[in-house]
Amino acid sequence: MNKKIKAPIYDTTESLTQYLRKVENFELQLKKEKYDFLLEFINKWLKLDDNIKLQSLCSFRNIYENKLLSDITHNNNILKMYSSKIKCILNIDIHDIDIENIKDKYIIYFIRKALTTINYKLKCKTIDNKKIYSIIIMKYL
């Protein structure tokens, strides 16, 4: 995440196909950087240590909303701590938001928005009037 990924520049000696392969690789690198950042962010948010942290975004399965929102101060602190990285890596600006006074569910809104940048989705289902969240890969039609 610390190294800057450079966009490919067309070299007139290469074919269009070679250049398009470079562009595709560039896009994959960008997506990987965002993916890795979101995985790190979510592990910190969930207070998971190295022994039990999520290994992939899709490992985030069937987590009750009341657990996700049980520590609003922690949620706000995580957003505050990561706000500059969020802006830099995901291009989502949360500096305009008064983090001290945001709504309880803002972090869920943020995770939804952030996941869409890499074609993932925070899915919600309700069972016995309790919301349960999982992260899934968005399907293309």
Image (cartoon, rainbow, N blue to C red):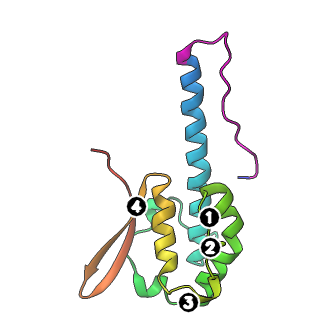
Quadrant (top left/top right/bottom left/bottom right) for the C terminus:
top left
Q: Do the residues labelled 2 and 1 touch (CB within 8 Å)?
A: yes
- Residue 49: x %, y % from top left: 63, 74
CA–CA distance in space, label 4 to label 2: 19 Å
Residue 71: mark in rendering: 3
What span is colored magenta in the figure? 2-17
Which amino acid type is marked by label 1?
Glu
7 part of magenta stretch = yes
| Image quarter of residue 42 | bottom right
Q: What element carries label 4?
A: strand
Judge from the rendering whether residue 4 lies leftward or rightward of residue 48; answer left or right: right
Residue type pointed to by label 2:
Lys
Residue drawn at x 56%, y 85% is: 102
Q: Which amino acid does label 4 sit on?
A: Lys
- Which mark is drawn over residue 44? 2
Tell which circle, 4 or 1, labels the residue nearer the N-terminal end: 1
